[in-house]
Structure formats: C-alpha cells, structure tokens
Amino acid sequence: MLIHGWILAAGMGLFAAAMVSIIVILLLNRAPHARKDAGRAGQTLVILLQNNRVTDSTPDVEQLLGQALPPNTDWSDLHGQLKQRFPDLPEDLPDHPLSLASANDADITLNLQRTGNLTRITITTPPQTTGRIHQLITTEAESKRVAALMEANPHPVWQKDLDGRVIWTNPAYDALLEQALVQNPTGCLFAEAISRRSDGETLRACVENQDGDKHWYEITSIEDGDITTHFATSINVLINAEMAQRNFVQTLTKTFAHLPIGLAVFDRDRRLVLFNPALVDLTHLPIDFLSAKPNLLSFFDHMRENRMMPEPKSYSSWRDKLYEVVSAAREDRYCETWNLPSGLTYKITGRPHPDGAVAFLIEDISAEISLTRRFRSELDLTQSVIECFDTAVVVFSRLGVKTYCNAAYHKLWGVPANTGTGEITIIDTSLVWQGACKPNAAWSELRDYVLTLQNRKAWNVEIETKEGVRLMCRIEPVSSGATLVRFDVLSTATPAIANEMASTELA
C-alpha cells in the first residue's frame, strides 16, 4: 500500500508539473497577442494640477502635446496647448466637472474634475484599429516631412492665436528675432504692421537689426479658425530696385525741370508717369490732374478742353487716330505742328522709350515761326525791290553763293530763272560771264574780290560781249560781307566818251 501510495504521489506530481508546463506555454503564446490588444485598446492620459500648476502627468502626455511639460507649468501655458485640440476649453479652471470632445476627433474626450486646489484632467482616446494605426503612421510621416520643410524654410514663418500670442515659430523667425531690434513689448516681429493689416491684404514691413541695417519683408497671412499663420518673404532686392527707379525718376525730373520743352512720358499702359514743369506751362493742365497719372486719351481730352490743340474736324475719328499716333511715336516717326487758336505754334514730337513706353515733346516754336515768316517777308521785299531795276543785278553772299538776281539779269545773260535747288557760286557764274565775253583780265580779280572779307572798296570794269555789246560791270560791297554786281549797258559811243560817262556816274 505504501508503495502504491508513493507511485500515486509521483504520478500526481508529474501530472501537476505537466499542467504547469502547459499553462506556461499557453501564457507565453498569448503574451504577443495580449500586447497587440493592449496597443489597440483605448488609452487614458492623466494630468494632475495643484494650485493651478502641473505636479504630475503620464508619460504619454508628451506625445499628445508634441513636447514635454516643463517643470512648474501653470494652467495658462497648459491651456494654450490643450486649446488647439479642445477649442471650447475655458481660460479659467471651472469649479464643476467638465467633459469636452476634440475638434479633430469626437472620440477623443477630455474630462476635468476639480476638488479643492487639486485638478485632475483625463484625456481618453478610442481603441486603435489596424487601419487607424496605418493612417496614424502615414500622417506622422507626412507631418515629419512638413516639419522638416518648415525647419529648412529660409523665410520666417510663425503662428498666432486669437489673443495675438505667438504659439509656433520656425528657425528662420527665431534667427531674425534674435538679430532684430524689436520695439514691441510682446517681442513679436512685425506686430505693429500686422495690427494695421486689412483682411486678405499683403503688406510690407521692415526689421532693423542691431547694426542699424533695414531688411524689408512682404507678409502674407492665412487664417484657419483661431490660428493665423504668417509668412514673411524677403524683398530687399525689390525694394532696392524700386528705390533705384525712384531716384532715377527724381534725377530725370530735376534734369528736365529747367527744360523749356514740355515732356510727357506714358508707360506701356498709356499712363502718364513723368512730366516736367514746362508741360504745365505749355498745356495749362492742373498739376493735380497730371499727378494723378491720367491716361493718354484723358490727357489729350483736357488739352482740347483748354484749347491747347487745334480743333479736329472729327474729334471722335481723331481719338481713334491716337492709336496710330502712339504707334508712329514708338517708331520715332511722329512729328506735327499745331497752330493754336491763340496764335501760338506748337511742335509735337513722339519718341519711343524702353519697355513699350512713349514720350511726347511739346515745344513752343511761335518765336521761331514768327522770325522765319519775318525773314521770308524781308526776302520777298528785297526780291521785289531788285525786280524794279532795269539794270541787271546779282548778289553773292560772303561765301560766294548767289542769293539774289532780277529778271534783267536773266535776260542779259540768258540764264533761266529756275536753275534747280543747288547752290550757284561766283566761280560758276563768272565762268558763264567769261564764256559770253571777249577776253578780259578782270574775271579772276572779280572772283577774288567776292571771296575776300577785308579791305574791300567799290570798283568797276568795262567788258564787251562777243556780240559787241559793251557793259559797265560795277562791283560794290554790301552788308554781312555780301557783294553786289551790276551790269549797265553802254551806248555805241567811243571808248573815251564811255569812260567819261562812267566817271560821271561814279562821281
């Protein structure tokens, strides 16, 4: 019986050991599944506060907030971080229990329980399915790429909440903030400029560094709920180019300020971008009108209203013709003379400018036209006086060019009245005389006399044509270095009588 008892006890021990082994194996096989189920189960995050300061929290809170909670974090700092997930979270800790759902996921809830000076915040997340976990992994990878892009962005980017507090910045913003002299008490860049911004407006602002250098930025703001994201792009090159252009325009304005010719430059959009004071004097257009950058049609309309341009027969057709005028000016072939009702005469010239611009020059040529008309009148008077002489008369300028002659001269020498537009000199004319007369040594002396500018006295010489007509050639100096030559026909008297007559006439 004792032997049988030991055998039974040994068998029970072996059975018990076998059962323990089976249980251990089952537990080991079940452990991975248990860990997986735990990963898929819901998660609870806890934050404890005492006297409105964080005293403890579960480790997973760092994943929720994206950063670890610094020691002695107070409720205001924690509220700013939790409000991004739970917008309805009040600024002050409530005395009553509170339950809120996340704005991004209604299954994520926040429960707040306050007891005295102790506050317990519990954040519960739903169980994670396989698809949800895959989605989170994909979202996390995308978030990391976006974060890397923001980190590498050379332009300042920052976010602000509704209260105007900066809640996120990129390294470019931090570097600029470190170098800049920020006058704003909040230490925020561009705060004053952004406060004046209208909805959807892109504004410009500058930041002055500690060396006194100014850097210009163009700020674009995008609002998304309670968060506003600001992007600052450096426009130093653009500002420098605009300043250089402005200085160039000012230099041109100063250069043309004393120019008596009116200047009007229109850009490629046919807007007046540059004018000088002479244009105001010549067109009588108001300065405020010109400063408002009128277009080309409006500019000429106001000139017509001021009667500073000739009235066209059909003004509507002339307005259509303005496009042809601009085209001609761009090709540097537009030039017109305007006879105004006031008696003034303007010369309008069109000139092409770079980048499709065109310039119009308005010049008052009334004095020039008046002088030309007076000079032409004097020429006509002189010519009419010479025509009254029966004696052949010809006048040469100080350079020996024939300027006047009368009909008696043409008849005597058989020269046509119109010999072309070319200049006829004393050499050409004297050769005609020499060819029509008998040999005489006075021709070379006459040519030298006409081309001599000093010590000139009147003299005469008798010549005879090949037909036997005797002529008395009288050479006399006149004003401005010119020379007058007359040919008087002598009678058939003897040479002695002819000389006596010539001496009497000269006396």
Image (cartoon, grey):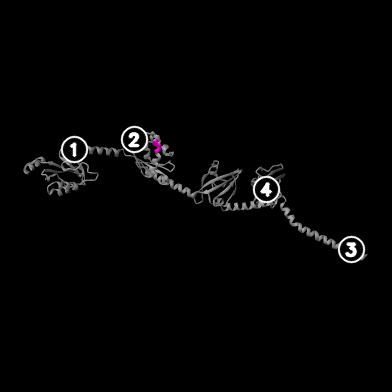
What amino acid is at disc 2?
Leu
Quote the CA–CA distance across marks 4 and 2: 88 Å
Q: Is residue 320 magenta?
A: yes
Q: Which amino acid does label 3 sit on?
A: Leu
Q: Which mark is residue 53?
A: 4
- Please identify the residue farthest to the bottom as the structure is shown: 3
Residue denoted by label 1: 387
What is the x, y in percent for residue 38?
Answer: 73, 53
> Few, some or many C-alpha atoms within 10 Å of disc 4 (few <14, some 14-19, many ≥20)?
some
- Which residue is disc 2 drawn over? 340
Q: What element carries label 4?
A: strand
Q: Which of marks 4 and 2 is nearer the N terminus?
A: 4
Question: In the rendered structure, which disc, 1 or 4, sits on the residue that comes first in sequence?
Answer: 4
- Please name the residue that numbered disc 3 is placed on: 8
Amino acid type indicated by mark 1: Glu
* Mark 1 nearby-residue class (10 Å; few <14, some 14–19, many ≥20): some
Of marks 4 and 2, the one in the foreground: 2
Q: 161 or 42: nearer the eye?
A: 42
Crowding near the residue tagged with mark 3, few <14, some 14–19, many ≥20 C-alpha atoms within 10 Å: few
- Residue ID at (82%, 61%): 18
The span from disc 1 to disc 4 (Cα, nearest Å) is 121 Å
Q: Is the magenta stretch mostly helix, strand or loop?
A: helix
Expressed as whole percent of the image width and height from the top left, the position of residue 479 reads 19, 42
Q: Where residue 162 sits: x, y (%)?
A: 60, 43
